[in-house]
Amino acid sequence: MRDPYEVLGIDRTASKDEVKKAYRELAKKYHPDRYANNPLNDLAEEKFREIQEAYEVIMNGSNNYSNGSYNSSSNSSYSSSEYTSIRSYIQVRRFQDAMNMLNTMSNKNGEWYYLMSICLIGTGYTNQGIEYARTAVNMEPNNMEYRNHLARLQNVRNGYNQRAYQYNRGNYNNNDTCGCCTQLICADCLCECLGGDLISCC
């Protein structure tokens, strides 16, 4: 992989806010949805994945770039291009494609359970999704991404209508007062999967 700072076009001394800003601008520019039915679609998707991987590597604190290669920590859950592809599928709500990739992987680490949890919730299997989220946190208790995900799920289960966390698949009546909450929390989860934060309080 190229130097992630070069990929995002930022200085190595950039703050986290600057990293996030650069990532969001580039992700928006090269998002595959903008190139649907376009000859440049494959190139855009490849660039989008490179941007995602660069962002995740920087935010994960792996700063050991040297001699044209990037040496991330052996414990880094973000070093695999497979996981980057899976996150790309999740970001565009292609949950079944993401699950298909996850099911081909033999190494089921914390990230595997975390991403599978999102996919399960996205396809309507809320209870199983919560269990997978718990497994991810049990495997990597210091990972705040997993802990925040589980906390949001538990808050919804304990204090709110459970449908408010399910990914909206077009089955809600327009008059359903939960529909707005459903869409907001769904968007927040997808944003946080990619390092953003739509709803800062949860």
Image: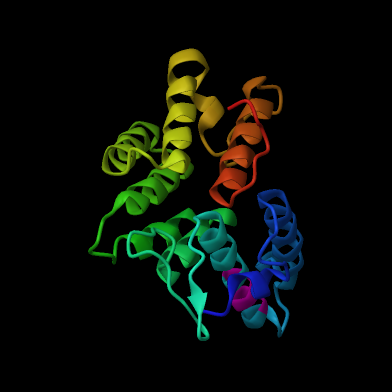
Question: Is 75 on the left or on the right of 149, as rendered?
Answer: left
Q: Residue at x 31, y 40 (%)?
A: 132
Q: Nearer the viewer, residue 6 or 193?
A: 6
Q: Which residues are magenta?
A: 44-49
Question: Is 59 on the left or on the right of 26, as rendered?
Answer: left
Outermost residue on the top side: it is 159
Q: Residue at x 48, y 62 (%)?
A: 62
Q: Is residue 158 shown above or below 108?
A: above
Instruction: Indicate the quadrant where residue 170 lies.
Output: top right
Whether residue 200 appears in magenta in the rendering, the answer is no
Q: Is residue 88 visible?
A: no
- The picture places residue 48, in percent across and down from the top left corner, at 63, 70
Whether residue 48 appears in magenta in the rendering, the answer is yes
> What is the magenta segment's predominant secondary structure?
helix
Question: Is 10 on the left or on the right of 83, as rendered?
Answer: right
Q: Nearer the viewer, residue 126 or 51?
A: 51
Instruction: Indicate the quadrant where residue 158 lies.
Output: top left
